[in-house]
Structures are given as C-alpha cells and as structure tokens.
Image: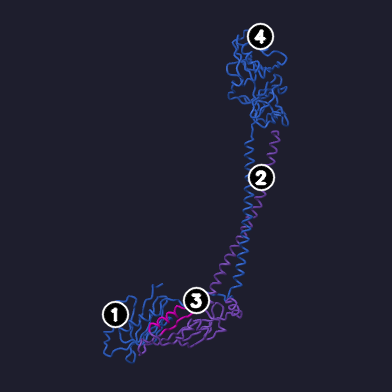
Chain colours: A blue, B purple
Amino acid sequence: MFLLSSTGIHIPLNEKGDAVGMFVPSQTATRRFTDIQNPSKGTVKARLSLEGAEQPLWRMFDDRSVEYYGSVAEEITERRASVSIYLPKDFLPEGYNVFYYVFNDRWVVYGERLISDEGAVDWVYSKFDTVDEDLTDFLVGVISDRLVKGVREKICVATHNCVETQSALQESLSPFDIETVEFSSLKLDKVKPIYQHKDFGILMLFGFFCGFVLMVATIGFYAKSYFELSAVQDDIAQIQAEIAQMQSEMVLGHIEDPDDVLNRVKQPKLVKPSSLLHETGEIAAMFGTLDSMTIFYGPPFDMGAGLRIGLDERRREVITTARVEQSEAEMLVDQENVAKAIVTTKEYVREIMRVNSEDTKLNLSVKMQIGETE
Amino acid sequence: MTRSGFRRLWLLVLIILLISSYMVYNKTTNKQFEIDNVMRVKDSLVLERESSKSMASRLQKVDELTLHEPDTTRLDILRFLGIEEDNIFEYEPTTRLVQTAGGIEIYERTFMLKAELPYTVAMRQIDKLYANEKVTLLQVSMKHQNVPGHIVNVEVEAKIYALDKGSSYSANMIRRKR
C-alpha cells in the first residue's frame, strides 16, 4: 500500500509484486470534463495535453463525464509489477460518511461526504503529517471536535501498518463508541481504479517464447531442407555413376530395339515334344503298326490330300501326323469307330483325320488341345 | 529495469526473432524450390536408370540367345546347343538367312540333327533341345526302325540365331571371363 497526492509520494512503494495505492486529490486540482468523446486513457491524455510518461488519474461517471485528479509520477508508471490507484472513498464501507485512515503511525487521510442543497454528493479530502505531534492526541482531538458539533454521522477509523499507535488509538476512541479497524479489512467493491497498469510479464515471456520457438522451428526446417537437398544431390551423383557404369558395361549397345530381336529369336514353349509324340504314337498305334510320326512347330498348313500339320498358338491347338501300316482287311467303319472312341475318351483330342496313301500305309493327322485358348 | 525499458527490449528481441525467422524461412523456401528441382532431376534419372537396367537386361538376354556371327564355327554352334560332348546327333547345316530386326541384321541358321536312338533316349534328347531357349524347333520326326531294342530314327529340324555383336565383343568376353 502506498500513499500519494498531487504534492508527491508520501508513503513510497518498497515491496515487490502487485501494489494498490491511494491518491488524495486536492479540491483545487480536481477538474471535471464533459466534452471528451469516448473517454479512454489516450483521449483523456490528449484532452489534458499530457506528454511522455505522464499518466492521468481520472475516472468516468455514468453521464460519461470525466473527473481528472492529477497525474502519476514516473516512479509509479515505470514499475514492472501491476499498480492500481484508488481514491480514499473507494475503500470506505457502505453507510459511513466520514473516515480517518492512519498510515505508518504518521499520515492521516481524512475524508467527508458533503451533500449540497441541490442534493449533489461531493467528497472533500485532506491529509495530515503528524510527524511533529502525537498522533493519538491529534486524532482524538479532531474526532471529539466533530462530535461536539452534534451532527449525526458515522465515522470510520482504519489503520495501516501502525505498530505503535494501534492499541492506544483503540483505547482512546472507545469512549466515543468508534471502533478502529485494520485497513486491510476494508474491501474495494467493484470500483474502477483511477489509474491502473498491469504486469504483462508472463504474456511478454510467452510472446518471446513463441518468437523463439518460431525461430528454432524455421532454423530446424532450414537444416532439414539443407540435409534433404544434400541427400538428394548425393543420390543423383550415385544414380549418374550407376548409369555411367551400366552404359560402359552394356553389351550390344548398337541394337535399337532388343524386344524386336527377342520376339524374333525366342520360341514360345507351349508343350514338350515328347508328350505330343508319345500321344500321337499311342493314338496311331490303335489304327495299325506305327511307322513314323512328325510334329511341325510352324503355323498349320496343308501337306496335300487334306492332311494338315502345324501349331496354332492362338487357339492352342497342335496337329501332328503319323503313318501306320494298315491291315488290308481293316474296314473303314471300324477305323471310324476307333477314332470316335479315342475322341470320346481323350478330351484333349479334338479331331482325327485319315488320308489313304497309294500303298498300304495310312496317314493320320491328330488335332490336340494343348491348353486354354486365349 | 524500468517498465518501458523492459518493453522496448522485449520488442527489440521479438522483432529480431521475427525478422530472423522470416529470413531463415525465405532461405528455406528457396531450398525447397531447389529440392523440388533436384527431385525432378532425380526422378528422371531414376527412370533413365530403370530403362537402362531394363535395356541392359534385354540386351543381355539377346546376347545369351544369339551367337556372334563373324567368329561362329561348327564347334561354337554345338557348344551353343549344349550337345558338343554328347556326340549323339549328327549335325548338318541347311540354310543361312539374313533378316532385319531391331535395327540390326539377324542371321538365321537352320540345321538338321539326325540320330538313331532308343525311344526313351530320343524323347529325352528332343525335350532337352526344346527346353533350350537358344534353339527354335521347326520340325521333329521319328521313324520306327525294324531292329531290336526300340531303336528309332530321329530327325530334328531347328534354327538358331546369330548377330554381329561388334568388333570389341570378343575382347570384352575374354576380359569378363578373366
């Protein structure tokens, strides 16, 4: 708690942390303004033509008029921690109209509520320095003078930091039925201070922290990008080296289209020739004594007299030929029955054709399925 | 320190932090653009490497499946067919055609392989030839021989391919073998 008036700071602010102050305005310095639009610290300061660090002590009323009490010393405005300054009447409990606040066994702040003939309420304040006289005697004197006048009023006496005079005051004022209370017990009830500045230290620290984190993050992002770029550049060098080595080791580099060459050179391997030959032989042996058999791996063509041979890759069909010694007594119808039986029992045999040659030999062509068609 | 002094210092530090962050961020965005560019280069190089790899593997396959035409001897062909040590088949070259494919000349060598073999051996030898990727079978004939032991007369008509693999090819092959 500190005390100040338009003449200076009477009880200086020594302790750290948030502080509450009391300003005792003088009747002559107090001015009322009704011409300030949107009253704020800035507009009031502008209206009063205050400059620099000088801050106004002011309060706005319900009719938007502004009362100016004086200005705050730089010593207060430059304090890092929060400061709130109130008028003496702001501490007064409801129902009292006169108060005496005693500070540090020395300073007495007096206030009285006055009501004019028009019913307007006004407060007058005084402060006394009792350094050269006895505080208890002074206070008892002024209070007894008031009581002698016989005006009905309720007086509040509060002490702050009064180690020596607290008990003496209490004892001396008890005959007047006035109780001395501790100033700390007086509460400020929803009243706005006439000056206030807050400690934004935490907020500023948070802002600094955000800025610091932002910078660290951008530096981190930069470092990540730098290393990423280096890694990609290393990769590129490695790939270029690999390509160069591959090209130096590449054989047959003069071939423009190796796929074309491969398509020409590679033969599709559909079915083993031994399977085809053995199957052809088995089928042919049912018509007579096997003489010879042939597989042709090219596209099917007519060998003459309707006898076909070849491999149809698209339809997955192969036509093989066989030559058998046929019995002269063999009936044509019997051969047909044998062929039908073979086609019926062996599902992959699609067709058996026979072509008689000029001698006793019989030429057969056997069409077989060698897989699923495309 | 006074309230306004502290506030000025705080503002100064904050402005320095923000300006330096902005400058570093600007540098980082430039780096990111650079990364985008080199990534594009890398992607194209990766594609080039993959296509080179694929090309090399296909050329390697062509190399495996073909002979080097200028130096080809009978022994080379038998070795190419994998029958140089068996001494089973009688090799008889028939035709040699020149075709064009993939921008180069391909030499198509057709030949006959003849042998008299037991039936099972003949089948095995024909399958072995068929399984050889280097050989393209054209026709396989088998004729029964009226001799004991299921001996058959086998005739295989097939073809192989050869290329002119360049003058440095033989030297390279020797170096690789070493």
Q: Same chain for marks 3 and 2?
A: no
Which residue is the site of mark 3?
Answer: A263
Which residue is the site of mark 2?
Answer: B18
Compare residues A255 and A141 and report the one nearer the observer: A141
Q: Amino acid at mark 2?
A: Leu
Q: Amino acid at mark 4?
A: Asp
Q: Could you tell me which secondary element the residue under label 1 belongs to? A: helix
* Mark-to-mark CA distance, 3 and 2: 66 Å
The image position of residue A35, as x and y in percent, is 67, 26
Compare residues A175 and A144 and report the one nearer the observer: A175
- A328 relative to B2, above or below: below
Q: Is residue B129 magenta?
A: yes
* Mark-to-mark CA distance, 2 and 1: 95 Å
Q: Residue at x 28, y 83 (%)?
A: A336
Compare residues A324 and B155 and report the one nearer the observer: B155
What residue span does the magenta drawing correspond to?
Answer: B119-140
Q: Residue at x 59, y 80 (%)?
A: B170
Q: Residues within 10 Å of mark 1 (few under 14, many from 20)?
A: some
Q: Does residue B127 appear to the left or right of A50 in the view shown?
A: left
- A327 relative to B18, above or below: below
Q: Disc 3 vs disc 2: Cβ atoms closer than 8 Å?
A: no
Q: Same chain for marks 2 and 1?
A: no
Which residue is the site of mark 1?
Answer: A340
Q: Could you tell me which secondary element the residue under label 3 belongs to? A: helix
Q: Amino acid at mark 1?
A: Lys
* Mark-to-mark CA distance, 4 and 2: 67 Å
Q: Which label sits on residue A216?
A: none
Q: Disc 4 vs disc 3: Cβ atoms closer than 8 Å?
A: no
Where, by quadrant of the figure, is residue A39 drawn?
A: top right
